[in-house]
């Protein structure tokens, strides 16, 4: 376990619009946290920053420990990963058991 610390992070889009302006928060050890907001508010960009896909333009990000993030388009055309594979990849080892296939019963 660990924590995520976001301190005064700012991100400006290539067209000059400020998407994130001085964002700060801390997610403590063992916390399960959701990021909720309107379309275009910067949720995906913020998570991409936290995941380390690119550095913040200003401010600081610290991730200590493991981080589990469910991508926005898991299981869609853009991503061949199944939800099962994603959940197993971020689950603790004690929960990751043998793979089982569940099928819906056929309708008569």
Image: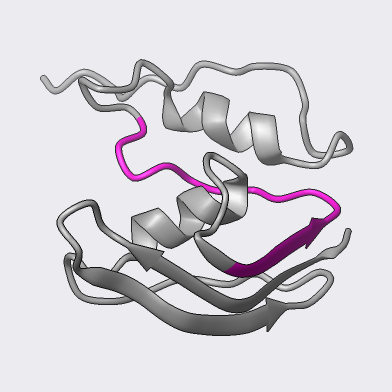
**Residue 21: x %, y % from top left:** 40, 81
* Residue 26 visible: yes
Does 72 lie within the magenta span? yes
**Residue 33: x %, y % from top left:** 58, 72
Task: Between residue 48 and residue 102, name the one nearer to us.
Answer: 48
Quarter of the image that includes the N terminus = bottom right
* Residue 41 visible: no
Left or right? Give the position of 56 relative to 10: right
Q: Give the residue at x 49% y 83%.
A: 22
Task: Between residue 64 and residue 101, name the one nearer to us.
Answer: 64
**Residue 34: x %, y % from top left:** 49, 71
**Residue 29: x %, y % from top left:** 84, 71
Left or right? Give the position of 26 relative to 75: right
**Residue 3 image-quadrant placement:** bottom right
Magenta portion: prevailing SS class = loop
Left or right? Give the position of 101 relative to 91: left
Task: Between residue 68 and residue 49, name the one nearer to us.
Answer: 49
User: Can you say whether 17 is above or below 69 in the image?
Assistant: below
The magenta region covers 59-74
**Residue 2 image-quadrant placement:** bottom right
Q: Give the residue at x 43% y 21%.
A: 81
Q: Give the residue at x 48% y 48%.
A: 48
Does 38 lie within the magenta span? no
Quarter of the image that includes the C terminus = top left
Color style of the picture: one colour
């Amino acid at each position: 376990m660990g924590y995520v610390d976001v301190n005064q992070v700012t991100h400006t889009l290539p067209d000059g619009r400020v998407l994130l302006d001085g964002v700060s928060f801390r997610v403590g050890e063992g916390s399960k946290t959701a990021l909720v907001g309107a379309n275009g508010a910067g949720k995906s960009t913020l998570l991409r920053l936290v995941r380390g896909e690119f550095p913040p333009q200003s401010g600081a990000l610290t991730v200590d420990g493991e981080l589990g993030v469910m991508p926005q388009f898991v299981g869609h055309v853009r991503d061949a990963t199944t939800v099962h594979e994603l959940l197993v990849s971020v689950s603790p080892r004690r929960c990751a058991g043998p793979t089982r296939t569940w099928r819906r019963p056929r309708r008569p």
